[in-house]
Image (cartoon, rainbow, N blue to C red):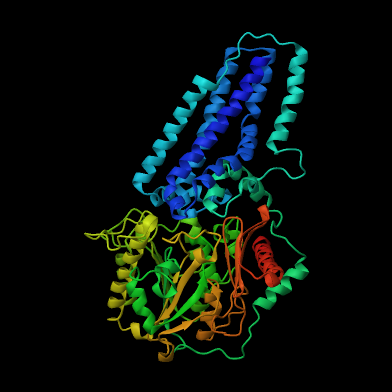
Amino acid sequence: MLRIIKSLIKQYVYWLLVFAFVRLLFLLVYSYTIWLEEISLFELLTTFYYALKLDIATASYFLIIPFFILFFQTLFSPQWLNGLNKIYIGFILFVFILINTIEFGLYAEWRSKLSYKAFSYLEHLDEIANTAQTGQSIILLLLLVGLTAGGIYLYIRYFYTPILRIKIKPINSILFLLIGPTLMTVIARGGLQEIPINQSQSYFSKHLILNNAATNSAFNLFISVIENTKNFNKNPFIEMPFEEAEPIIKQLFLPKSDSIPKILTLEKPNIVLLILESWSADLIETLGGEPGITPFFHSLEKDGLLFDNVYASGPRSEQSMAAIFSGFPAHPISSITVQPDKYKGLPSWVHLLNERGYDTSFYFGGQLIYGNIKSFIMYNAFDRVKEVYDFSDDLPHGKLGIHDEFALSEMADDLNMVKEPFLSALFTLSSHSPYNQPKPDKEVLPWGDNERQYINSAYYTDQSLKKFFKKAKQSSWYKNTLFIIVADHSHNSYRNHDMQESDYHKIPLLFYGEALKPEFHGKINKHMGYQPDLAATLLPQLNLDATEFPWSKNLLDSATSEFAYTAYEEGFTWLRPAGEISYEKRLNYYYVNTVPESQFDSISKEGKAFLQVLFQDYMDR
C-alpha cells in the first residue's frame, strides 16, 4: 500500500515542478517587462509562493484519473495500467504546455491570461498564425515539442512508480477509495472554507504580470470556460435591481444642451473614415506621446478638430466595429460581432447614409474573416467591400495582407470614380503584429524598448497617410470631404500600461478636412468620451437622428455627461473626471481605484450599473 501512496505523492510533486518550471520560463520570456517595472528579486520569487495553492489544486484535478488507475492497481496490476498512466500523463502534459506556449505568444499583445474568448478565434487558425511573427512561431513550436518530450522523459525516468504484482488487503483498497477522493476534493477546492479556491488566491502584487504569472494557466482557462458557458443563460454582472441600474444609465445619456454647434460647411459631405489598427494615444504627441512617432498626424491637427479625451471601448478589432458603426460598447466574455443572431438588431449609421443616397464602401488590405468582422461589415450594407482578394494582384503584400500605403492609394484612386456624396472606410493593418511593413534602409525610430517594432510600424502607417492625403488633395472630391481618423483599439506602448488602466485604452479621434468650418481648425475638444460616441457626435452634423444609438452621446454637447468605459477580458474600467475604477466582479477585485473616497460609492455604482445593463442588452438581443 505504501508503494501506491508513494506513487500518488510523486505525481503531485511532478506536477508542482512542471508548473513552477513553466512559470519560470514565462518570467524569463517577459523579463524585460519585469525590469521596466523595477520589480525586486524578492517580489519576483514571491510569485512562486503565491502560486502554490492554486498549483496544488490544479494538480488534484489532473490526478483524478491516475488516482483511479492506482485504485484498480490495488486490486489487480496488469502492465497495461502502467502504460495507461503514462499515456494519460503525456496527453495532459501536452495540453498544459500547449496552453502555456499559446499564452507566451499572445501575452505581449493581449496582456492577459488565455481565456474562454480565445476559442472564438480557433475557426481561423491561419489568421492566428499570420499574426505571429515567423521566428516566434518556430520558437513556440519547438518549445511545445521540447517541453512535452522532456517532461514525459523526466516523468517516466524519475517520478513514475511502476505497479506490478502487488498484494493489498481488501480493507486497505476500500480505505484508499474512501479517503483518497475526499482528501483530493478538499485539496482541489483549496480547503474546507465555504468559497472554493479561485484565481484571486494568486493575486498578490500591484504588478499585473506577477499576478498573471502566479495564476495557473490551466486552472484559469478551465474556470473561464465553465463560468462563461454558464453566463449565456444568466447575466454574470448583476450588482443591483434593474429598476435601480437603468435610471442611472438613462441619466448618463440625457442630452443636456438645446443647441449643438454646427461644425461642417456642408449638410451632405463626403466622409472618409480611416480606422487605424492599434493606435494608442502614446503614439500621438498632442495626446501625451513622445514626439516624432506620428509627425504627419500631428501636422493634420492644425487644420482639424482633435478629441483628446477619448477611449477605446474594448481591446479587440471586432469589438471596435460594433462600437464605431453601431455605437454599441464592447463587453467582457464575448463580442456581439461574432454572433449574427445578436448584431442583426443593432443600428448602423451606414444604413442611414445609404438611405440618404450615399455611395458606401469599406476597404481592408487583409482578410476580414478574423473575429467575424466581414459578416458584420456586410450587415452594415456597404455597397462595396474590398479585402485582400479584391485588390490588384501586383500590390506588395506582407504577412497579413497589403501594406497600408498601397491599400490607401488604391482607395484614393477608386474614389475618383465614385459619385458624390460617399462614405468610404478603410481599416489599416500595418501596425498589427508581426509589423512586416516595407522596411526602410535604417530603422527610423531606434528606441521604444519592447515596443520598438510597434512604434516604427505606426510611423510607417503615418507616412502612408501622408502619401494618401497628398494624392487625395489632387482630387475633385477632396474639398467636399470630412475625414474622420480613429483607432480601432489601443495597444501596449513603450510606457507599458496595464490593460486594466484607462491610459492603456486612450486613443486618437480627429475630424479633418475642408468640410470642417475654419473656426474649428486647430481646436481641441476635451470632453471625456469613448468610441461609441462617434455616432451621436457625427449624425446631428448631417441632420440625422441619433436616438436609435442609446449607448452613444454627443461629444460636441459641452454639458452632457463626461465618462468613458472600456471592457477587458472579464472586467471593465470606468472613468470619470474625478478618477477611475477598474473592477472584475468574478474576483471582486479592484485593479485600479483613483476615485476620492467621498465619491467612490457613487462612481463605482455607476460603472457596475453600466456593465450590468449593457450585458443584459447584449443577452436580450
- Percent x, y for residue 391? 32, 62
Residue 544 location, quadrant: bottom right
Figure check: 194 above or below 232 = above
Say which of 363 and 355 sits in front.
363
At 58% from the left and 63% from the top, the residue drawn is 343
The percent coordinates of residue 419 (x first, y second) are 37, 80
Taking the image as drawn, is residue 114 in sight?
A: no
Q: Residue at x 45, y 28 (%)?
A: 150
- In this view, which residue lies farthest toward the left? 441
Q: Is residue 56 visible?
A: yes
Judge by depth and name the residue closer to the eye, 264 or 30.
30
Q: How many marks?
A: 0
Tell me residue 12's x, y (percent). 61, 28
Q: Residue at x 63, y 74 (%)?
A: 550
The quarter of the picture where the N terminus appears is top right
Q: Quadrant of the C terminus?
A: bottom right
- Where is residue 495, by image quadrant? bottom left
From the viewer's side, name the closer residue of 507 and 187.
187
> Who is closer to the viewer here, 555 or 471?
555
Position of 476 relative to 169 (above/below): below
Instruction: Please say if 576 is above or below 64.
Output: below
User: Where is 39 relative to 417, above or below?
Assistant: above
The picture places residue 40, in percent across and down from the top left corner, at 50, 49
Q: Residue at position x 57%, y 17% from top?
A: 161
